[in-house]
Image (cartoon, rainbow, N blue to C red):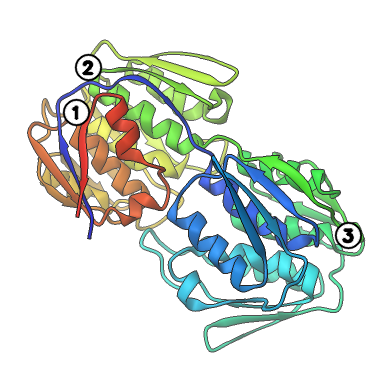
């Protein structure tokens, strides 16, 4: 089991590049299932979730070639085994994204139900309901979704709740359906736009991505294409919060400020000075941060994936902040670990009341999920003394070489067995 050891108290200074977005890359890899021709994807981050997804696609018959520097070519000329087994799905819930493309292209799919998730329920009922509306016959037996169809048909689908993976799954399925599909109450995340851009480059006819109504005109087939994965807005936000908390000055390259308006607004409110242009963001922090209230909500509001990081910032900020989590019911598990570092946090229902203190204490802590691990890293960077973070395999699911990038910014951080 690997751990991170951090010696806190050093401000972050310097320049790093942001990786491609995990949450954009995963559905883009699944889009390769929709065509017999090769799909070339660039700026793919080197993450455990990416490795898992590629392994899953390979066992379905997809041929994958890596060209280095985050570039890979996927060829699904022959789909021999349209099954996503429990062993793979249990470690990565995004595996459900193969369901729509497999049904559209192969007419059948057998996908394990994702099962539990540390941060809360993520039901797949919206995926199933939408595919049934498009003519799929779906049964759930022995923990697996069994789906078949002769040909998917366009339909008007209204999501009961905003779901990113549900929107992506049905958007991919609809590209090869007969007729027009309209998705209402669709997710508006930038990753949806990135996927739509790739699908359109493959010959799809998608309009309205980035709004809550997406229209897809089905086509008879898709062809190969080349696409570059968008920058990771959550990795960007995490490094910006780390620099704000430590009183640093950093320059992030290969990113886009327009992807995280709500996050930049809160950092400015905390006292950071931010400048940006087309593909870079600079942040300077000269004062002790001020507490900021947070309420998570679907895009373009404040992202749930940045809540934990801001909690670490609020732990050492001037004042008291109320942080309300509206997306996932168990996404405050990092509170207990931060309290081990002497943080002053009280939880009431789905809200945490955080009163800033002068100094966190280094301690042995344990990561409970991906973004909780990032919050503990930030807390370790500002804490007095040594922090040891256990179960960092969570971190490797969503952050490419985080200790290398933080070291380049002057942090004292190392990975040990």
- For image coordinates 32% across by 56% down, the residue present is 393
- For image coordinates 43% across by 37% down, the residue present is 235
Residue 295 x, y percent position in the rendering: 42, 38
Q: 391 left or right of 398?
A: left
Mark 3 and mark 1 lie on one chain; the one further toward the N terminus is 3
Q: 57 left or right of 150?
A: left
Q: Residue 266: name its quadrant.
A: top left
Q: Is residue 213 visible?
A: no
Q: Is residue 128 visible?
A: yes
Helix, strand or loop at mark 3:
loop
Q: Is the residue 320 above or below the residue 362 in the image? A: above
- The quarter of the picture where the N terminus appears is bottom left
Which label is found at residue 288? 2
Q: Are marks 1 and 2 in contact (CB under 8 Å)?
A: yes
Would you call the spot at circle 3 few (<14 residues within 10 Å), some (14-19), or many (20 or more)? some
**Disc 3 designates what residue?**
221
Q: Are marks 3 and 1 in contact (CB under 8 Å)?
A: no
Residue 160 x, y percent position in the rendering: 64, 59
Q: Residue 119: name its quadrant.
A: bottom left
Q: CA distance from mark 3 to mark 2?
A: 56 Å
**Disc 1 designates what residue?**
316
């Amino acid at each position: 089991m690997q751990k991170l050891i951090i010696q806190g108290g050093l401000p972050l200074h310097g320049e790093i590049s942001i990786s491609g977005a995990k949450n954009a890359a995963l559905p883009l890899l699944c889009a390769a299932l929709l065509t017999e021709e090769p799909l070339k994807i660039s700026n793919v981050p080197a993450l455990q979730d990416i490795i898992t997804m590629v392994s899953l696609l390979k066992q379905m018959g997809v041929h994958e070639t890596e060209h280095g520097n985050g570039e890979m070519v996927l060829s699904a000329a022959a789909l021999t085994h349209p099954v996503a087994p429990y062993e793979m799905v249990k470690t990565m819930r995004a595996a459900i994204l193969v369901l729509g493309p497999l049904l559209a292209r192969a007419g059948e799919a057998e996908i394990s139900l994702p099962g539990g998730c540390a941060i809360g329920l993520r039901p797949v009922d919206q995926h199933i309901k939408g595919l049934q509306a498009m003519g799929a016959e779906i049964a759930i037996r022995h923990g697996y979704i069994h789906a078949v169809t002769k040909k998917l048909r366009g339909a008007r689908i209204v999501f009961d709740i905003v779901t990113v993976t549900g929107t992506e799954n049905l958007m991919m399925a609809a590209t090869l359906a007969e007729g027009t599909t309209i998705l209402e109450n669709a997710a508006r995340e930038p990753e949806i736009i990135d996927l739509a851009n790739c699908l359109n480059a493959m010959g799809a006819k998608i309009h309205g991505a980035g709004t809550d109504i997406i229209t897809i005109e089905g086509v008879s087939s898709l062809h190969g294409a080349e696409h570059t994965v968008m920058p990771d807005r959550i990795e960007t936000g995490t490094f910006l919060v780390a620099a704000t908390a430590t009183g640093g000055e950093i320059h992030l390259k290969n990113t886009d400020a327009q992807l995280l308006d709500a996050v930049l607004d809160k950092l400015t409110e905390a006292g950071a000075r931010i400048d940006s242009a087309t593909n870079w963001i600079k942040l300077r922090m000269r004062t002790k941060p001020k507490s900021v209230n947070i309420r998570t909500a679907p895009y373009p509001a404040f992202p749930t994936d940045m809540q934990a990081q801001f909690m670490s910032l609020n732990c050492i900020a001037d004042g008291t902040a109320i942080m309300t989590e509206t997306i996932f019911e168990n996404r405050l598990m990092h509170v207990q670990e931060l309290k081990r570092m002497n943080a002053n946090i009280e939880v009431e229902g789905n809200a945490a009341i955080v009163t800033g203190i002068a100094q966190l204490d280094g301690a042995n802590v344990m990561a409970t999920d991906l973004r909780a691990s990032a919050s503990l890293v930030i807390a370790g960077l500002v804490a007095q003394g040594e922090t040891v973070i256990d179960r960092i395999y969570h971190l490797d699911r969503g952050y490419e070489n985080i200790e290398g990038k933080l070291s380049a910014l002057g942090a004292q951080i190392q990975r040990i067995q």
